[in-house]
Each structure stands twice: as structure tokens, then as C-alpha cells.
Amino acid sequence: MSMTEAVIQGIIQGLTEFLPVSSSGHLALYQYFTGNNSESGALFSLVLHLGTLLAVLIAFWSSILPLIIEFFSMVGDLFRGRLRLDTRREERRMIFLLIVSLLPLGLTFLLKDILQGTAADGNIVVEGVCFLVTSALLLLADSCPPGRIRAKQMSYRAAVAIGFAQAVAPLPGISRSGSTLSTGLILGLDRKYALDFSFIMGIPAVLGALLLDAKEILGGGLAIEPGVVAAGLATSLVFGLLAIGMVRWLVSSRKLRWFGFYTLVLGVVTLGIGICDVLFGHPVQAAVIAFFAK
């Protein structure tokens, strides 16, 4: 992989990880139409996820820090035998809700190989279908009236529902931010709270994925130059911060439907090309690869 390819993929990852359009879906399309469907391509996407993880930590630090402080307070209450699930402290209740929302990730762990394999299966039919699912969620969420539910009123069932939306997000074309945010808005969550909950709950998920593949990324035979890794990491971080700012504006101004229409068109086109390539021996993929190889 060249430095230019690393920067391009870093830009794609940084922008599409947080914009509700699916970073994994766009990276899958890029890798499909450049012929880079190898294991190194799949693992390099995890390196890019590290950059966007750092972007979340920076952008949401003011919301994350009180949760960290409250967590250590919970640990102290646990040792003193005073820990209670029923609490009126918003930060503490949000921690419990976040923990519950992570439980469906067990499904992701069990189906890890299948979910990752769809991005390198040699066709983009699944990607097309998943883009359409993302579109449906975004359009439905945009049509819902503004909610008022925050941590104190949020149910654990709502946390589980948002958790399931995150659990299927590894499918290329399903936007993690789009599916979790849309689910929260559909369930009546306050828009700012839904955004914070969606992004913060993604931190453990990304960390878990990185830790599971740390051996392969750091030296398990992955032939990627350190400079290429650094370029992709830095680019995904910078463009991730830009994308987070845009998502905040989109949510506050109720303009998610723009991306609902975008993923609808992209899904129809992707599905059409995918079916054509499967039936006729990948003529579109070959034509695109040949064009950029000139």
C-alpha cells in the first residue's frame, strides 16, 4: 500500500466513520474498485479506526471526563458496599446504560469472522443492501418529532436496542453512528444526549476490536510500512474531528435526511453494480480498475 492510498483511505475513514453513511461500506467500495480486497486492506481499516477513536476522545472529552470521575466514585461505593443500580445521578445512570448497551456486542464477537468476511467476499451486493438499511433508519429518525429523554428517563430496554444497532454495524454499509443515533432518536432521546450516547458507547467497541486484532496489526505478518500507518492514522484523526463537527450541526438542525437520500441513491447504485458483476463476471469492477491503472 502506498502513502497516497493510505491518505485517501484515511480521509474516507475520517469523514465516513462519523457522518451517517458507513465508513466500512465506503472503504469496502474503495477496496473493491481498486482490487485491494486483501487481508492487509481489512486490517489497515482497523488502524484507521484508531485515528477516529482518538477523534472521539478529543471531541467528547467534556462529556467523557465526568463519566470517568463518576466511574471511580462507583468503584469506591462498591468497596464500601453502597453501590446501587437505582440512582438519580445522571452520570452514574448513564454509565449503567452504557454497560447494558454493550452486552449485544457478544453477538458481534461470535460472528466476527462472518462480519469481517463480507468486506472481502469479492462482491458488493451485501454493501448495497446495507446502505439501503442505513437510509431507511436515517429517514425514519429524521421524520420523528424531537425527543426529551435523557439518562434519568432512559430505559435499559432502549439501551439494549441501541446496542443491537451497534452490534450489526460491522456489516459494510451499516453506519455505526447512523444506526445508533437513529435508533436513539426513534426511541425519543434528546438529540444532544442521543449524539453523546451514540459516540461514547462506540469507544469500548472500537477498543475491543483493536485489542482483538492487536497482534496482527502490530506484527503478525502485516506488510504495511510504519510511515503508511502513520499517514493513515493522522489523516483519519483530522478528518474525523471535522466530521464530528458536521454531525453535531446536522443533528441540531435536523438535516439527517440529506444523508438518508445519499445512502438511498448509493445503495441502489451499489446493489445494481453488485448484481451485474456477480451475473456477468465483474465487468464494472474490471473497467474501473483498468481506468485508474492507466
Image: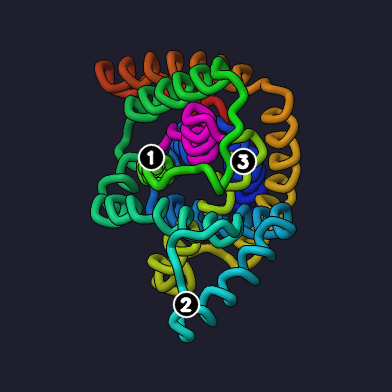
Q: Position of residue 102 (x, y in %)?
A: 40, 55
Q: Which residue carries the number 3 mark? A: 195
Q: Eyeballing the image, is 229 above or below 38?
A: below
Tag 2's secondary structure?
Answer: loop
Q: Residue at x 24, y 55 (%)?
A: 110
Q: Which residue carries the number 1 mark? A: 161
Q: Which residue carries the number 2 mark? A: 82
Labels 1 and 3: the sequence-earlier one? 1
Q: Are marks 1 and 2 in contact (CB under 8 Å)?
A: no
Labels 1 and 2: the sequence-earlier one? 2
Tag 1's secondary structure?
Answer: helix
Q: Which residues are magenta?
A: 172-189
Amino acid type at circle 3 is Leu
Locate residue 21 relative to residue 255 in the image: left or right.
left
Amino acid type at circle 2 is Arg
User: In the orientation shown, which residue stands out farthest toward the bottom?
Assistant: 79
Q: Are marks 1 and 3 in contact (CB under 8 Å)?
A: no
